[in-house]
Each structure stands twice: as structure tokens, then as C-alpha cells.
């Protein structure tokens, strides 16, 4: 493929290097950002939640580290980069970012959760048992609106929005069903809840329902049902925003209040 001796040596080094899976991941990510920068004649930088500006190499390392950690939960995992440009000059661009975590994303036969498939229809919700031992299904949820939060214990955006979700439960109380459902085991969720306050009614170990039935791969997902069990609104996590110090923080979740208010009037 490569004509001269020096070129062949370089080619062999490249082949040997990228037999290592970690190096392949790093190379692919760096190639993406390099190509992006070259296309626009500018280098890409990233602003962390703490307000620190980092380069592409520094950005990629914790990203790949998180992927490897998540693979202990599911071998087919990926992170989708959500970038928002906040600054540009002649030689550089700065982005804020957050990561959408996708479980089962690497499978050749994997599918994705499509909200349009469920909107304006009764949500398929077979019997599940809560951590308290209660049985919950779609019929038991009818009679008042329901917010179902799909999450997992290692999902940073899921954890970030929990205080907002707790606020909603405090505000609306028993007038709304508040359900949290995850594929994580009961033992793992129970341990998590000793560290984090998450006041929703908890359903754990629902891997079949989440990943097979709903084909859900990206988290968090929030589904709002009306009093008839019909999905009226489906959203991902509460959006992030820049605060007065130009740091990326979780939003106030007021759009969730508006959706619940709408459902209570229906």
C-alpha cells in the first residue's frame, strides 16, 4: 500500500498501535475534532462545568474513561457529544458540552427509542414492582397525571436533574404519580439512594422493559402521561444553561412545571 521503506515502517507502526482498542477510540475522537478544526481553520476548545477551558486531548481522555466504566454495566455503550458554541475568533472556537449516554448503541441490531411511536397513545407499561414491594402498571396510574423518569445510577445528567424532580414532587404531591424506573439492580439502586435523595417511587431491574420493549438507549428520558395513561409529552433531560458566571449548570425545569400544569387541566 505504501511505496517506500520509511512509509512502510510508519504504516506497520500505525497498524500495530490501533490493534489496541483504547488507542483506536482516542484516535477516532481526535481525528473528528482535528477534521472539524481544519475544516474551519480553527482549533476547538471546551468549557467544563467548572468553567475551565480544555483542549481536545484533555476533553477526550475523561470521555473515553467514562465509556470504559460504563462498559462494566453494558458492553454496548457510547457517548453522544452535544456541543454548543459560545465563542469564536480567527483561530479558535470554544464549546460548552454535555454527553448523552447510549446503552446498547454498538450492537448491529440495536434500535433507538422513538418518541413519536408513543405520543398520543396509551403507554405500554406492564406490571412492575417498586422497591417498596408495591405492584404498579398502567391501570394503577390512571386517574391522575404521571411523570415517569428513566435513569440509571452512573448517569451524570440523571443525577443533576434529581433535585428539580424532587422539587416537582414536593410541589404537586399526591395530585401526580411520580415514578422512576431503571435497568440497574435493586441492590445497586438501594445503595445509590443512601447517598442521593431521590424521592420518586422507584422501580429497579427493568432491563427487559427499558432496553428491549421500549428500545431506550439514551438517558435520562421523561415521559408525561395524562390521567388516562396517554403519553402527552416526552423529553430527554432538563436542559443545561449558562449561569451568570458563564458556567454550564442544570436549568430550573420550569418547562416540566408547565407540562404538569397542562396535564392537570386536561
Image (tube, rainbow, N blue to C red):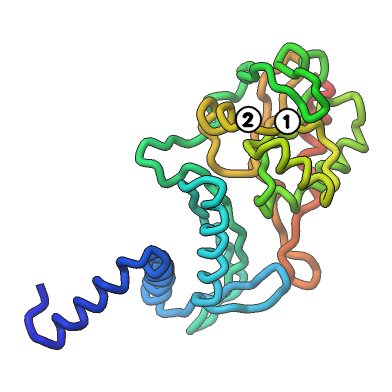
Residue at the image position 10 percent from the left and 72 percent from the top: 1
| Label 1 residue SS | strand
Residue 224 higher or lower than 44, as above or below: above
Residue at the image position 87 percent from the left and 36 percent from the top: 169
Residue assigned mark 1? 203
Residue at the image position 57 percent from the left and 51 percent from the top: 100
| Contact between labelled residues 2 and 1, with CB atoms less than 8 Å apart | yes
Residue 97 higher or lower than 88, as above or below: above
Asked which quadrant contains residue 41, the reply is bottom left
Residue at the image position 75 percent from the left and 56 percent from the top: 250
Q: CA distance from mark 1 to mark 2?
A: 7 Å
Drawn side of residue 168 relative to residue 2, left or right: right
Residue assigned mark 2? 206
Drawn side of residue 3 relative to residue 128, left or right: left
Q: Is residue 85 visible?
A: yes
Asked which quadrant contains residue 108, the reply is top left
Q: What is the crowding at mark 1: few (fewer than 14 residues within 10 Å), some, or many (at least 20)?
A: many
Image location of residue 160, percent across then percent down: 75, 53
Amino acid at each position: 500500500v505504501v511505496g517506500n521503506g520509511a512509509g512502510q515502517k510508519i504504516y506497520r507502526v500505525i497498524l500495530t498501535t490501533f490493534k489496541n482498542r483504547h488507542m483506536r477510540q482516542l484516535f477516532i475522537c481526535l481525528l473528528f475534532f482535528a477534521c472539524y478544526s481544519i475544516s474551519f481553520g480553527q482549533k476547538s476548545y471546551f468549557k467544563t462545568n467548572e468553567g475551565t477551558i480544555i483542549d481536545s486531548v484533555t476533553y477526550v481522555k475523561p470521555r473515553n474513561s467514562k465509556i470504559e466504566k460504563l462498559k462494566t454495566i453494558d458492553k454496548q455503550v457510547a457517548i453522544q457529544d452535544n456541543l454548543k458554541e459560545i465563542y469564536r475568533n480567527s483561530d479558535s472556537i470554544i464549546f460548552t458540552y454535555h454527553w448523552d449516554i447510549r446503552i446498547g448503541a454498538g450492537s448491529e441490531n440495536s434500535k433507538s427509542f422513538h418518541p413519536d411511536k408513543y405520543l398520543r397513545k396509551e403507554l405500554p407499561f406492564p406490571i412492575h414492582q417498586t422497591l417498596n414491594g408495591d405492584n404498579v402498571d398502567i391501570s394503577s396510574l390512571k386517574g391522575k397525571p404521571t411523570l415517569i423518569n428513566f435513569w440509571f445510577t452512573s448517569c451524570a445528567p440523571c443525577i443533576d436533574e434529581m433535585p428539580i424532580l424532587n422539587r416537582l414532587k414536593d410541589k404537586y404531591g399526591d395530585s401526580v404519580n411520580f415514578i422512576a424506573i431503571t435497568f440497574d439492580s435493586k441492590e445497586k439502586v438501594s445503595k445509590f439512594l443512601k447517598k442521593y435523595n431521590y424521592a420518586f417511587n422507584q422501580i429497579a431491574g427493568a432491563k427487559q422493559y427499558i432496553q428491549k420493549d421500549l428500545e431506550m438507549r439514551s438517558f435520562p428520558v421523561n415521559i408525561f402521561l395524562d390521567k388516562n395513561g396517554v403519553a402527552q409529552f416526552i423529553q430527554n433531560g432538563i436542559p443545561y444553561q449558562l449561569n451568570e458566571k458563564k458556567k454550564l449548570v442544570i436549568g430550573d425545569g420550569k418547562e416540566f412545571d408547565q407540562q404538569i400544569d397542562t396535564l392537570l387541566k386536561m
